[in-house]
Image: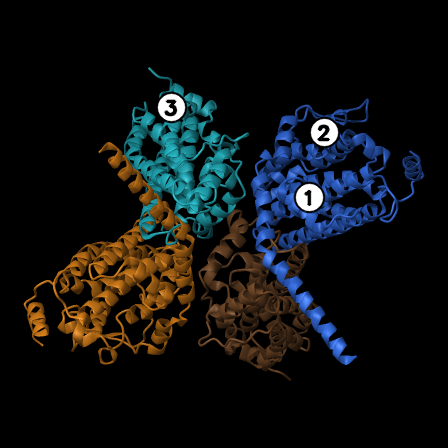
Chain colours: A brown, B cyan, C blue, D orange
Amino acid sequence: MAATVSREVLTAFLLRLADDHLVIGHRLSEWCGHAPMLEEDLAMPNMALDLIGQARALYQYAGEVEGKGRDEDQIAYLRRERDYVNCLLAERENGDFAHTMLRQLYFAAFMQPLWQGMLSSSDAHLAGIAAKAEKEVAYHVRHAGEWVVRLGDGTPESTRRMRAAVDALAPYVDELFESDDVTAAIVKAGIAPDPATLRPSFEAIVGPIFAEAGLEWVEASYGQTGGRQGRHGEALGYLLADLQHMQRTYPGMVW
Amino acid sequence: MAATVSREVLTAFLLRLADDHLVIGHRLSEWCGHAPMLEEDLAMPNMALDLIGQARALYQYAGEVEGKGRDEDQIAYLRRERDYVNCLLAERENGDFAHTMLRQLYFAAFMQPLWQGMLSSSDAHLAGIAAKAEKEVAYHVRHAGEWVVRLGDGTPESTRRMRAAVDALAPYVDELFESDDVTAAIVKAGIAPDPATLRPSFEAIVGPIFAEAGLEWVEASYGQTGGRQGRHGEALGYLLADLQHMQRTYPGMVW
Amino acid sequence: EAFLVAFQARIDAEEKIEPNDPMPEGYRRTLIRQIGQHAHSEIVGMLPEGNWITRAPSLRRKAALLAKVQDEGGHGLYLYSAAETLGVSREEMTEELLSGKAKYSSIFNYPTLTWADIGAIGWLVDGAAIMNQIPLCRCSYGPYARAMIRVCKEESFHQRQGYEIMMTLARGAPEQKEMAQDALNRWWWPSLMMFGPHDADSQHGDQSMKWKIKRFTNDELRQKFVDATVPQGEFIGLTFPDPELKWNEEKGAYDFGAIDWDEFWRVVKGHGPMNRERLAARQKAWDDGAWVREAALAHAEKRKARREAAKMAAE
Amino acid sequence: EAFLVAFQARIDAEEKIEPNDPMPEGYRRTLIRQIGQHAHSEIVGMLPEGNWITRAPSLRRKAALLAKVQDEGGHGLYLYSAAETLGVSREEMTEELLSGKAKYSSIFNYPTLTWADIGAIGWLVDGAAIMNQIPLCRCSYGPYARAMIRVCKEESFHQRQGYEIMMTLARGAPEQKEMAQDALNRWWWPSLMMFGPHDADSQHGDQSMKWKIKRFTNDELRQKFVDATVPQGEFIGLTFPDPELKWNEEKGAYDFGAIDWDEFWRVVKGHGPMNRERLAARQKAWDDGAWVREAALAHAEKRKARREAAKMAAE
C-alpha cells in the first residue's frame, strides 16, 4: 500500500495547482472582448472557463482536506500575495497574442501529462477532477498549439513575435518541473507524478509543434523560480488587487 | 455677514475638491519612472506630490468639518466607488504624454482661479490651504502649458497627438464649471467662487496657450457629467482597486 | 409589380424566405442592417460585462460571467453568419461598426460601475432583448429566425441568472441592497429606451411589420417588458425610479412615465458616456489583431501550397 | 611618465581634480563608468519603489514615497551632469544602459513584493548606498564629490524614513511584523552584495583607491554596513536571515555568513528576477518618449528661428 500524506502536504499540493489555474485563467480572461478575431473572443473565455472550473474543484477539495472550514472563495480571494503559490509562468502578463498562446501551450503541455498521471491517483477525488480536466486540457494543447504553428509559420511579423515570445518565456519553463518535499511526498503516496518526470512528455508535445512552426527551442541560462514559495513578480500584486477587490471591500457577504 | 453652510454641505464641497486632487495625482504618479525624459521623471512626481498634499489638507479638513472622527486615510481609502465625487476629467486614463499634459493644464487652469478665489474665503482654514496651493498650481499651469505649446507647435507627430488629446478631452471640460445646490450654498457663504464664473479665467489661461501652440479649441457637442454624483467611467474602479488595496486587505492598521 | 406581390404573398402565408430565394432589395437591406446591428450589439456588449470578469466577487459568479460573455461572442458569430447569407461579409460589417456607420444597441454605451450592474444587465438588458427577440424566432427570413431560436434560449438563461444576482443582492447586506437599487436606478430608463422610439416616430417600423421581420411595434414590446419586469423587481423589494409607474387596472398593464428622448438621441448619436471608449476598444482589438489575422491567412496559404506541391509530386 | 607622477602627487595632496584639468585616460574612464553606473542605479531604482506609489497604504506614506522617487530622479540628474563634465553625453550613457553595456546596481533586479519592501529598500539599500557614498564626498574628482554631498544628505533622510517604516511595521499587527521580517529576509543578502565582490576578487579596486576615487575597500564598507545595521534591526525586534551572524568581541565587529556569489554573478549577468523587466521598462519609456523629445527639440528650433527672424527684421 502506498504511503499516506498529511493534510498539510496535500493541501499545499492542491493549492499550487489551484493557484496556477486561477491565475492563468485570470490572465486569459483579461483578453475578453479584445481578441484579434471573434473566434478567439469565444475560445479564450472558453479556456479561461475551463481553468477557473478546474481551480474551483481544486480549491473546494483543498478546503475539505485542510479541514478549517474555508470554502473556495475564502481560499481563492482572501490570502495575501506571499501566500499564493502559483508558478511564475501563470502570472506573466499577456503581452501580445503570440505571447499569450505560447504561455498557454507551455502550461497545457505541462498539465496534460500531470492530469493524465492523476487519472490513476491513489486519491479518488483527485482522479475524478483529473478525468474531467484531462479532456479539457487536450483542447487547450490543440488550440494553443495550432496558434503557435500558425504564428510561427505565418508572416515575417508573426514569426518575429513568436520568437520573441519563446525568448521571453524561456526562463519560466524550468520551474514547472521542480520537485521538492511536497511533491516527493505526493509521489510516494501515489497521488500524482513527480513534475520532474514530466519533462519528456512536455517535450513530446511542444517539440513537434515547434518543429511545425519552424521555431527553435531556447534554453534559459537560468530559470526563474520562487512561485511555489510565494516569491512572485511585480505584476501579480496588481492582478490580486483586482481579483480580491470585491471580497476585500465587502467582507463576509454572499454573492 | 455672509450666510453659513451646514457641515454636510461644506463636507460635500471639500470632498469634491479632495477627490479631484487625489485622483488626478494618482494618475500622474502612474508615470513614475516611465516619463519621456528624466526632467519629467522629476516634474511629474513633483506635481503629483503637490496634488496629494492638497488632497490631504482637504481630506483632513473635511474630516474635521464632518465631525465623525474620520481621518484623511479613512476618507481617502475607505469609501465605495459610487461615493467618490471627483470630476470625470481627473480620472481619465493617462494616454500619451500629450493627453496627460493637456488634462493637467485643464485641471490647473480650473483650479488656479478657484484657489485664487478662495484666498479670501470666509473660511479661514480653507483660505490657508488656498494660499499654499495657489503657488503650486501656478507652476502646474506653467509646466503643463509649456508642454502643450511645445507639443502643439513641435513636429507633425506631436501636433497630431496634441490635437487628438484636445478632441478626446473636450467632453470633460464643461463638468468642471457645473454649479448645483452645494456650490450655491458655498458661494452664498463666501467660501469659494461659483465654478460657473471661472470659465472666463480658465479661457484666459488656456486661450493664449492654445494660440501659441497653434491649437484650435474643440467644443464638445455634449459634455459628459456625473462625477459629482459618483457616476464615473469604468477606469476609476481599477484605480480604486489599486489605491485601496492595502487598506482593504489590512483593515485598521497603522502604517 | 408582380414580384413584390408574390413575395408579400409568401410572407403572408408564413413561408420562410431562404438565402437563395429572390427577395426585394429593401427586404435584404433591412435585414442586413438589423442583423448586423444585432450582431454588433452582442460583440460590443461583451465589453461592459467583460469589465467585471476579473473582479467578480466569487468564483462561481466569475465562471458564470465568463460563460455568459462567451455566449455573447457566440451569438455574434451566428448572427454574422446569418447576415453573410445575405451577401455581406463579416469584414464589411466590422468596418461599418468601427466607422460608426452601423449602430449597436445604445445601452452598451453606459458604464458598468458596480457588480450589481452585471445583475442589472442580465435582468433588464437581456430581458428587454428577449422581448425583442422572441418574435424574431418567427421572423420571415429563415437563417435569422433559426439563429434567434438558439440565441433566445441562451438569453433567457442569462436573464434568469441576472435576476438571481439581483435577488441575492437585494436580500443581502444593506450595502448589497443599496448596490442593487442603484443599478436599477441607472439601468431602468436605458432599458426602456432599448425598444426604440415611439411607434409614431419610428422610421423602419411599418415596412418591417409588413415583411414580418418585426411582429410587434416598439411600444407594444416596451409595454410587455414593463409588465413582465415590474413585478419581478417588486418581488425582490426594489423600487423603480419612476414615480409615475403604477398598475392600470383598466388597461391591464402598467402606466409609466415619459422617456427622456433627448438622452436617447444623444447616446444614439455618439455622445453617451462610453460611446467613444466602446468603439475605441473594438478598434484597438481590430488593429492589434491585424497581424494575427494576416498570419493565419498566410499560414493557411502556405499549407495549401505545400499540400498541392505534395499532391503534384505524388501524381 | 612625468604627467602620471604629477597627477598622482595632486591626488596625494588631496587636491580636487576639475573638469578642465588634465587627467589620465584611465582616471577619466573609471569615473565615467562609475558615475554612469551610479546615475543609472538612481534611474532604474525608481522602478521598484515606483511600483508601490499607487498602492501606498496611507496618504502620508504615498507623499513620502513620491518625494523619495523624485529625489532619486534628481540624483540621476546631478550624476549625469557630473559625468557630462568628463565628456560623455546623457544620450550616450542612456544608450549604454539600454544596450546592457553599462551596469546599474544589481539590487534593483529584485522585485518589490509587499509594502514592507519599501521600508527595506530605504533602510538597507539606501543604507548600503550611503556607506558607499559618504567616502565619495571626498572623491578626488570635484564635480562627483560635490554631487555626492547633496546626494548623501538626501539618502540619509531616505534611510531614516525606510527604517521608520520598518519600525512601524515591526511594532504593528502580527501581519505587519511578518511582512517586515519577510522583507528583511529577502533584502538582506542582496544588500550585502551591493558592496561588490570580495577585495581579493575585485578588478577595479586598487587603482581606484590610489586615485582616491574609492577610499575604502568593498569588504571594509560591507563590514561597516553590517556593524551599523544589525543593531538597528535587532532594536526593532527583527531577525537577520544569517545563522552565522554574531558579534565578535575580539575584532569589535560582527561576523557573518558566506555570501552566495553565484547568485551575485547570476544577477549581474542579467539573470535576476527583474533584469529583463527593468531594462524593458526603461527601453519602453525611452521609445515611447522619442516623439516628445523630438517635438521639444523641433519647437526649440522653431522658436530660435522666429527670434532670429524677428531680430533681423528689427535691425
- Depth check: C42 or D77 in front? D77
Q: Residues within 10 Å of mark 2 (few under 14, many from 20)?
A: some
Between label 1 and label 3, give the one nearer the viewer. Answer: 1
> Is D218 left, or right, of B148 in this rendering?
left
Is A160 drawn above or below residue C78 in the view shown? Answer: below
Q: Which residue is mark 3?
A: B193
State which quadrant residue C63 falls in: bottom right
- Residue D38 on image: x %, y %: 26, 63
- Residue D171 on image: x %, y %: 33, 56
- Depth check: D237 or B118 in front? B118
Amino acid type of the residue that numbered disc 3 sits on in the rendered structure: Pro
Q: Give me the chain letter of mark 3.
A: B
Q: Mark 3: which secondary structure?
A: loop
- Residue C176 on image: x %, y %: 59, 42
The residue located at (57%, 40%) in the rendering is C276
Q: Which residue is mark 2?
A: C197
Q: Give me the chain letter of mark 2.
A: C
- Depth check: C8 or D228 in front? C8
Is B85 drawn above or below residue C86 in the view shown? Answer: above
Farthest residue toward the top? B1
Q: Which residue is mark 1?
A: C41
Between label 2 and label 3, give the one nearer the viewer. Answer: 2
- Depth check: C189 or B63 in front? C189
Amino acid type of the residue that numbered disc 2 sits on in the rendered structure: Pro
- Residue A203 on image: x %, y %: 59, 78
Whole-number angstrom distance, CA of label 2 to CA of label 1: 18 Å
